[in-house]
Image: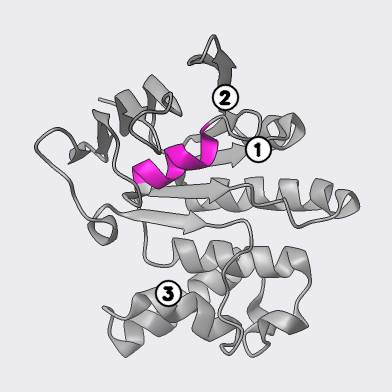
Amino acid sequence: MSFVAIDKLTFRYHKHHPPVLDQLSFTMDKGKVVGVLGASGSGKSSLLRLVAGLEEPEAGEIWINGKTVYSERICIETEKRGVGMVFQDYALFPHMNVADNIAFGLHKHNRRERKQRLEEMLSLVQLENYARRYPHELSGGQQQRVALARSLAPGPSILLMDEPFSNLDADLKASIRSELRMILERSNITCLFVSHDQADIAAICDHTILIQPHAEQLRVSVRK
């Protein structure tokens, strides 16, 4: 059984507009990184918001870790879906240092568990010496790693990444891509990775979903 499954997902922003996503279906295996590639406006970010529960589809079903999180009769709220998200702007809290940003989602853990998990995440993203620094004291690549660690800390079933390199300059991208791939492999996380840049997808992802408009519909092709 697939770890994540999307079945005939249809979504539109306005009732009388053409669908942004139309009958979209695909599956993901546990621990795989799947890239979603497409032009601006093709529905890539909408797909992530639907999986996360931030938007509700017009039709279709979504399964995560073998459980139905959305169907005609079921709609599991975002915080109970086991989803972590990394946004384009990283959304770090500027008044919190690195340690507090990473530990933000660990409020349900006791103090010892939070400390242990924080140490694990700092080690994973190789920021052990930056725990007391604030976001404005970090490079773009370091900020991205903090955002990644914060999303991974609660142990989500799936990680959603929306254009995570959009704020990085071209010279930095190559090294950050390899770092990210290594972190995802070490954490064994299932990840849905959205980008408009084919080089990002090729460097990081195991499989690719290509979403492209065609006669006011969307076609999806999957390649390894």
Instruction: Verify CB contact (< 8 Å) between mark 3 and mark 1.
Output: no
Q: Residue at x 60, y 70 (%)?
A: 146
- Vertical side of 124 occupied by 198: above or below: above
Residue that label 2 marks: 208
Assign the magenta stretch its main secondary structure.
Answer: helix
| Residue carrying label 1 | 204
Q: Quadrant of the N terminus?
A: top left
Amino acid residing under circle 2: Thr
Q: Is residue 9 magenta?
A: no
Q: Alpha carbon of mark 3 to alpha carbon of mark 1: how far? A: 25 Å
Q: How many marks?
A: 3
Residue 36 seen anywhere in this rendered image of the structure: yes
Q: Position of residue 176 (x, y in %)?
A: 75, 53
Residue 14: image location, x then y, percent: 38, 37
| Residue that appears at 72% across and 51% down | 166
Distance between the alpha carbons at the discs numbered 2 and 3: 31 Å
Task: Left or right? Give the position of 195 relative to 2.
Answer: right
Which stretch appears magenta?
43-51
Marks 2 and 1, how far apart in space?
Answer: 10 Å
Instruction: Classify the position of the C terminus by image quarter.
Output: top right
Q: Secondary structure at mark 3?
A: helix
| Quadrant hosting residue 19 | top left
